[in-house]
């Protein structure tokens, strides 16, 4: 009995030592790089995100269901506690999140080893890239099959520019006339974009989202491992954000002054839930 | 001697073959700036016009696979004989005969344009085809789908290889080839141009000369030479149409731009009727009468039309109108609208089954 007790103590001590050594991570070497991702976990209020016919209720008490959700994430930056920052090379920093395809929820990039306390990114596409010639619009920014923004149709052909955020669904309160949905399908459509204009200034709905990681877990980037910042993206905030609005009153918002109000709700969609460090495989996430 | 003869025959055969296979090998001269034109706006260093690129662009321009059900090509509404607009249509009918809301603009002298379409919503010629391809009333298709159709087509991989070095078919290459075709659509051989360049002893008649002077005093502020557009957006007092098309305002969301539309070039007007953004005027005479005494006042009416006596429009006597018309006749470029270089390629029974 005593021997078993001693053995148990020993095992416990060994376990603790290993636990400690795991916590006691090696000092970051800025000459090395590791994988870093932000995970865009779409939710609706206090529920997971599901599509039509699953119903949700917004702050105005209006029931709605979701047909599709797409948005661009770009221009990722990481910040350390000492104020230094790392900007991911721009051409590697464009992602399209499709709410209906969980494989698109990560924005995976390489970053120098380090402990990062803050991240920022653009919801949308920066003005500079929006003005670039066609050969500079690669990957998700292209129109090529299987790599571009195919199903999303995230571009306005009549008014050159990317649609940053595309959110469509159904709400039975929507009227059947020109102010609502004349097809009678009770659909709402929010296509939010606008990079500020090419030669004449116009609306700019580019939103830089900054997320502080200090509370829910810093991102420790190390070679051969992956650090994943898990964000909740609450689409309910589209309606319930600082500018609360009614779906039947504004069932279609595209390139218009009103879109500015909706874009102003975007930053409140994002909250940091937790960070997973030293991840060896995406299966762990 | 015998060997030489065989060689000669072989060389002859090679040339014969070449002539047979190549489309119009003699008339492609590349892009050239006419002597009386300014430097182009388009950045040719990114996308130099080559014969293979131009030929691919032409094939694509006349390719109905760009539309959802393979029925509408760019060339369906931009017809060469109409200076690449849709002659006789106030607004164009696209796919399933659906009607648009604006008159298609001519595709002419695109290399000198800074922005495209009546509201200037597209700022790069390479991006302009997206508008037509994705418009539900024009081609109602997606760009990825078009690329997929081209990749599966027996001819296109080889045509892309010829134009760009590899048979990869991408969005950028397709847009650049279409631009190469559109950039080559330079119209600069009207009588006006020949007079300006002093070619072939061309000279204005007395009436044309008087009309030219009237034009310089009254029209040139917007229709500036030699493009006959200053490429600005203006409200010319035609008044809103029934659908209340607000023009440039829809792109800038700036109330100052309400009812402003791109100043169209006057070149080739004889082939491009009807006129204005919604094609409401059928004849040049009606257009001139509008400026003479048909103008509707509004907040954004261009100040150029406000006369010192408080009236609006361009005062003109009947004689002045006649002379002006004579001058405007000199802006038509028959060589351009009949140039075989731009004609739809004969593909010979290329039936599209799906």
Image (tube, coloured by chain):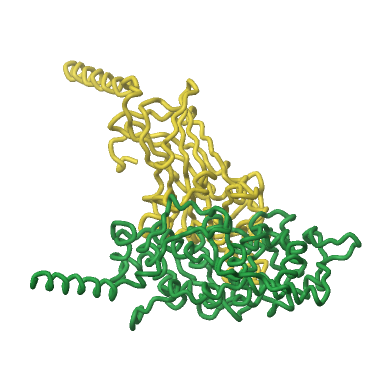
Chain colours: A yellow, B green
Outermost residue toward the bottom in this view: B349
Residue depicted at 42% across the width and 35% down the height: A88
Quadrant occupied by the C terminus of chain A: top left
Looking at the image, residue B337 lies above or below residue A144 = below
Q: Relative to the observer, which residue lies in front, A247 or B45?
A: B45
Residue A266 position by quadrant: top right
Q: Relative to the observer, which residue lies in front, A128 or B61?
A: B61
Place of residue B327 in the rendered image (x, y in percent of width and height, measured from the top left): 69, 72
Place of residue A136 in the rendered image (x, y in percent of width and height, measured from the top left): 43, 48
As drawn, is A12 to the left or to the right of B196?
Answer: left
As drawn, is B283 to the left or to the right of B351?
Answer: right
Looking at the image, residue B84 lies above or below residue A58 = below
Q: Relative to the observer, which residue lies in front, B339 or A115?
A: B339
Place of residue A156 in the rendered image (x, y in percent of width and height, measured from the top left): 54, 59
Residue B220 position by quadrant: bottom right
Looking at the image, residue B167 lies above or below residue A31 = below
Residue A108 position by quadrant: top left
Number of dots carrying numbers: 0
Looking at the image, residue B205 lies above or below residue B184 = below
Outermost residue toward the right in this view: B309
Residue depicted at 53% across the width and 68% down the height: B135
Q: Relative to the observer, which residue lies in front, A116 or A232?
A: A116
Residue depicted at 46% across the width and 69% down the height: B141
Quadrant occupied by the N terminus of chain A: top left
Place of residue B281 in the rendered image (x, y in percent of width and height, measured from the top left): 70, 77
Is residue B229 visible in the rendered structure shown here?
Answer: yes
Is residue B102 visible in the rendered structure shown here?
Answer: no
Residue depicted at 74% across the width and 78% down the height: B286
């Amino acid at each position: 009995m005593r021997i078993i007790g001693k053995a148990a103590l020993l095992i416990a001590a060994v376990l603790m030592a290993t636990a400690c050594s795991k916590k006691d991570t090696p000092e970051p070497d800025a000459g090395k790089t590791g994988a870093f991702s932000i995970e865009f976990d779409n939710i609706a209020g206090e529920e997971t995100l599901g599509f039509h016919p699953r119903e949700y209720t917004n702050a105005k008490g209006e029931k709605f269901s979701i047909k599709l959700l797409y948005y661009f994430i770009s221009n990722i930056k990481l910040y350390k506690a000492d104020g230094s920052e790392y900007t991911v090379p721009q051409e590697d920093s464009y992602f399209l999140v499709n709410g209906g395809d969980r494989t698109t929820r990560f924005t995976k990039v390489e970053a120098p080893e380090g402990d990062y306390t803050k991240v920022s990114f653009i919801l949308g596409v920066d003005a500079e890239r929006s003005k670039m010639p066609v050969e500079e619009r690669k990957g998700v920014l292209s129109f090529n099959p299987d790599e571009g923004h195919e199903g999303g149709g995230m571009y306005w052909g009549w008014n050159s520019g990317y649609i940053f955020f595309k959110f469509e669904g159904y709400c039975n309160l929507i009227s059947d006339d020109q102010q609502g949905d004349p097809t009678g399908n009770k659909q709402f459509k929010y296509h939010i974009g606008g990079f500020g204009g090419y030669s004449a200034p116009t609306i700019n709905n580019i939103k830089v989202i900054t997320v502080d990681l200090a509370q829910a877990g810093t991102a420790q980037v190390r070679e051969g491992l992956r650090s994943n910042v898990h964000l909740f993206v609450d689409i309910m905030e589209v309606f319930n954000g600082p500018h609360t609005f009614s779906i039947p009153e504004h069932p279609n918002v595209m390139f218009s002054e009103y879109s500015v109000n909706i874009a102003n709700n975007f930053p409140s969609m994002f909250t940091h839930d937790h960070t997973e460090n030293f991840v060896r495989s995406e299966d762990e996430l | 001697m015998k060997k030489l003869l065989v060689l000669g025959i072989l060389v002859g055969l090679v040339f014969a073959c070449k002539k047979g296979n190549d489309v119009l090998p003699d008339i492609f001269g590349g892009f050239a700036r006419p002597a009386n034109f300014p430097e182009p706006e388009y950045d040719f260093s990114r996308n130099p016009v080559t014969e293979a690129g131009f030929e691919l662009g032409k094939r694509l321009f006349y390719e109905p696979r760009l539309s959802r059900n393979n029925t509408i090509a760019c060339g369906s509404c931009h017809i060469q004989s109409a200076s690449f607009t849709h002659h006789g249509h106030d607004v164009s009918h696209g796919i399933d005969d659906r009607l648009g809301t604006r008159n298609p603009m001519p595709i002419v002298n695109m290399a000198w344009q800074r922005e495209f379409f009546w509201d200037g919503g597209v700022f790069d010629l390479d991006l302009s085809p997206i508008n037509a391809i994705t418009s539900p009333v024009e081609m109602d298709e997606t760009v990825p789908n078009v690329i997929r159709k081209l990749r599966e087509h027996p001819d296109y991989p080889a045509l892309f290889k010829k134009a760009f070095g590899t048979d990869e078919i991408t969005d950028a290459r397709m847009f650049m080839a279409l631009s190469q075709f559109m950039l080559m659509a330079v119209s600069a051989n009207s009588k006006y141009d020949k007079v300006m360049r002093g070619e072939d002893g061309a000279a204005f008649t007395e009436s044309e000369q008087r009309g030219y002077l009237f034009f310089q005093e009254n029209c040139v502020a917007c229709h500036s030479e030699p493009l006959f557009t200053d490429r600005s957006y203006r409200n010319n007092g035609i008044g809103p149409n029934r659908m209340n098309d607000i023009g440039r305002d829809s792109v800038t969301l700036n109330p100052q731009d309400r009812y402003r539309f791109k100043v169209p070039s006057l070149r080739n007007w004889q082939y491009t009727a009807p006129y204005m953004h919604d094609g409401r005027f059928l004849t040049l005479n009606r257009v001139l009468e509008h400026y003479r005494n048909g103008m509707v006042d509004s907040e954004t009416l261009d100040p150029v039309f406000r006369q010192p006596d408080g009236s609006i429009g361009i005062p003109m006597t009947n004689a002045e109108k006649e002379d002006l018309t004579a001058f405007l006749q000199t802006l038509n470029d028959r060589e351009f609208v009949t140039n075989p270089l731009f004609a739809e390629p004969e593909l010979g029974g290329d039936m599209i089954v799906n």
